[in-house]
Image (cartoon, rainbow, N blue to C red):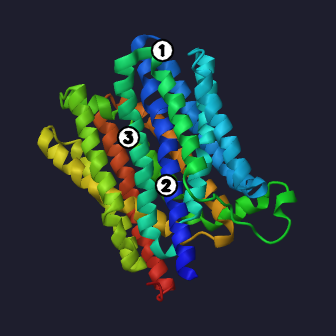
Amino acid sequence: MVSLLTREHRNLFWKYAIILFLTELVRGMYVLSYLPALPSIEAISLTLASIVITVHFVFDAATNAWLGFVMRKIGARWTMFATYVLMTAAMGIILFSQDFFILLLASALLGIAVCPIWIFALANVDDATRGKDMGFIFFSWLAGLGTGMVSMNFVIGAIGDDAVYVMIGAVALNILGYLFIPGKFNVGVRNGSSRNRRLPLKEIFVILRRHMRNIPGIMLQALGVGMLLPVLPTYITGLLELSFFEYTIFILVIFALVGFSMTMLSRGLDEYSARFTMVIICTGFFVYAAGIIWFSTLETVWVIFLIACFIGLSYGIMLPAWNKYLAGTILKAKKEESWGLISSLQGMGAMIGPVVGGLTADIFGNVKATLIASGLIFLVLTIYYIVMFMRTRRTNPKTN
């Protein structure tokens, strides 16, 4: 009986991962490829394209803050129905117009629509295989975004304006996957009449208070990585004098190494103690900090590439370790709400990061300043979590 339940849970988790991949595929196509390409064909200005992209992440972050509570009230079926209505509407309206306000509305709708599958997947991680599951979830995310971005770049180059039809096709594929892949989505139900209550603001503050000491890690990680987004192309193609094609290959190789680390190396997290997980987290933070700061002093491409590969491998195992650690701090009765708020905080950091990164480069007149600032943020996180984990070990010696 236990074996049967475990098999059903694993099959359902696979479905979550596949739907997450297909959802991020749509996001990668629209946000990472289609919108950035519009200024190059003078459809909209670079400033307006940046605003549209920012609006997507604003709605993503804002939605995650309350979505877990709504999901518990309306159930999984209505949550996914609303998800696909919004996603279809977002990609459907741009078939008829690429006006700025239409693109803005599509970004907002898609920002809301991508949130539920994340909460479903994170809330249904098996405690016994938490490290491996977290690695697989984030691999699905990375693979979906990367596949969407790269494939859409080729599609835009091949068929131009007709590329919008490919995005609505990706939405249709997502819906078919949800309908025909075996497994029924579910939301944990608590005792009592939770469906009839208003959104519990008190519970939001309870969850925030519980995760208060991890808010720096949740937000500053996303901020530090997000800072690099606006300056990385300039740094690689400008200062390092690589072509855009070489830049694309550079990024794809790093993505592949991160994905390998997330899926293969992260499997060992479940076989070792909590202390090992803490060591991986602090080591990952430090490697990122040292590597990014070192970048600012180098101009030799192959050395930078080797360092970037090492950062990719270490960050790929650190991220599942980090999320395994966070999962261990979440109350089981409030998984959906907790992951929703955590995702919202991460979204806020990711939203602010590009702005801070661009401003830092402008103020100091050099993109290397952004690299140093990003590295310093992770250095602060390294020190913060070393101290916090040592205090945890001291106050709770029984921690494995």
Kind of residue sitting beneath label 2: Ala
User: How many angstroms separate mark 2 from mark 1 (CA)?
Assistant: 36 Å
Q: Mark 2 falls on what kind of element?
A: helix
Mark 3: which amino acid?
A: Gly
Task: Identify the residue under disc 3.
Answer: 146
Residue type at mark 1: give it. Answer: Ser
* Marker count (numbered): 3
Say which of marks 2 and 1 sits in front: 2
Left or right placement of residue 177 versus residue 190 in this view: left
What residue is pinned by disc 2?
A: 17
Q: How many residues crowd mark 2 within 10 Å: few (<14), some (14–19), many (20+)? A: many
Which residue corresponds to the image point at 37% horizontal and 61% vertical from the top-left?
A: 318
Mark 3 or mark 1, which is nearer the start of the sequence? Answer: 1
- Separation of residues labelled 3 and 2 (CA atoms): 15 Å
Depth-wise, is mark 1 or mark 3 nearer the camera? 3
Query: Which residue position is annotated with label 1?
Result: 45
Foreground mark, 3 or 2, reads: 2
Residue 159 figure quarter: top left
Image point 30% across, 31% down: which residue?
Answer: 233
* Picture quadrant of residue 28: top left
Instruction: Tell me where residue 212 appears, x and y as whole percent.
Output: 60, 63
As drawn, is 300 to the left or to the right of 388? left
Q: Position of residue 230 (x, y in %)?
A: 39, 32
User: Disc 1 versus disc 3: distance between alpha carbons?
Assistant: 24 Å
User: Taking the image as drawn, is residue 344 in sight?
Assistant: no
Image quarter where the C terminus lies is: bottom left
Q: Is residue 183 above or below residue 1?
A: above
Percent across and percent down for residue 200 are 79, 58
Name, please, the residue furthest toward the top: 42
Q: Residue at x 32, y 38 (%)?
A: 369
